[in-house]
Image: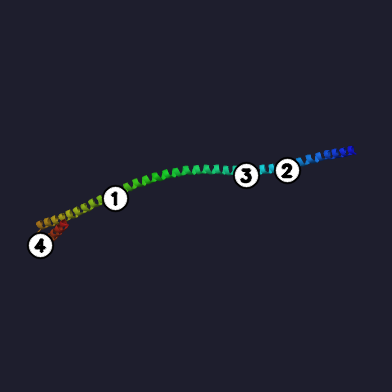
Amino acid sequence: MNTWQADWDKYNEDSAEPQRIAEVSKSSIQHSETSIARIAQRLERLQHELINLQIGEEAEEQLAMLDEQLEEKELQLEQQQQDAAQFQSTVEQEREKQQHLSQKLSESRTQLQSAMGRKASLEALQQAALGTDSESWSLVAVQSNSSKQTSCR
């Protein structure tokens, strides 16, 4: 009976070995599946990060391009401000010239009116001297008074 018992124990031991190996394999498979799931999640996360980095790189490129455009616009603005200041200075100079010329024109008109009044007085005096017309003498007196008033202004 001892042999039969020993054979039975050996049989149980031998039959338990494949079950133990199956359980170890099953445990190993579960561990591998868990590892694969974690690796897949990590891979997915890394792919999202890569996409975000690519988007970030594109954003950085666009930002650099916008910075360049901003610098160009600032230079253009500075140039336009300088041009505007120069134009403003030119306008002020031209206004001063215009004001000076207007003043000279006014003075010239005053001198012209005075000269025309004097000429009219002299012509009236000449006509009066050539003729003895009493109306001519009274006209000379009126024009002479008028000429004096214009020169006093």
Q: Earlier in the sequence, mark 1 or mark 2?
A: 2
Q: Is residue 109 above or below residue 18?
A: below
- Disc 4 to disc 1, C-alpha distance: 53 Å
Query: Which of the pair 85/70 is nearer the observer?
Result: 70
- Where is residue 135 drawn, in percent x and y? 12, 62
Q: Earlier in the sequence, mark 4 or mark 3?
A: 3
In this picture, residue 150 sits left or right of residue 87:
left
- Disc 2 to disc 4, C-alpha distance: 145 Å
Which is more foreground, mark 4 or mark 3? 3
Neighbour class for label 1 at 10 Å: few (<14), some, many (≥20)?
Answer: few
Which is more foreground, mark 3 or mark 1? 3
Say if mark 2 contacts mark 4, CB within 8 Å: no
Q: Secondary structure at mark 1?
A: helix
Q: Residue at x 44, y 45 (%)?
A: 73
Residue tagged by mark 2? 30
Residue tagged by mark 3? 45
Which is more foreground, mark 1 or mark 2? 2
Q: Earlier in the sequence, mark 3 or mark 1?
A: 3
Neighbour class for label 3 at 10 Å: few (<14), some, many (≥20)?
Answer: few
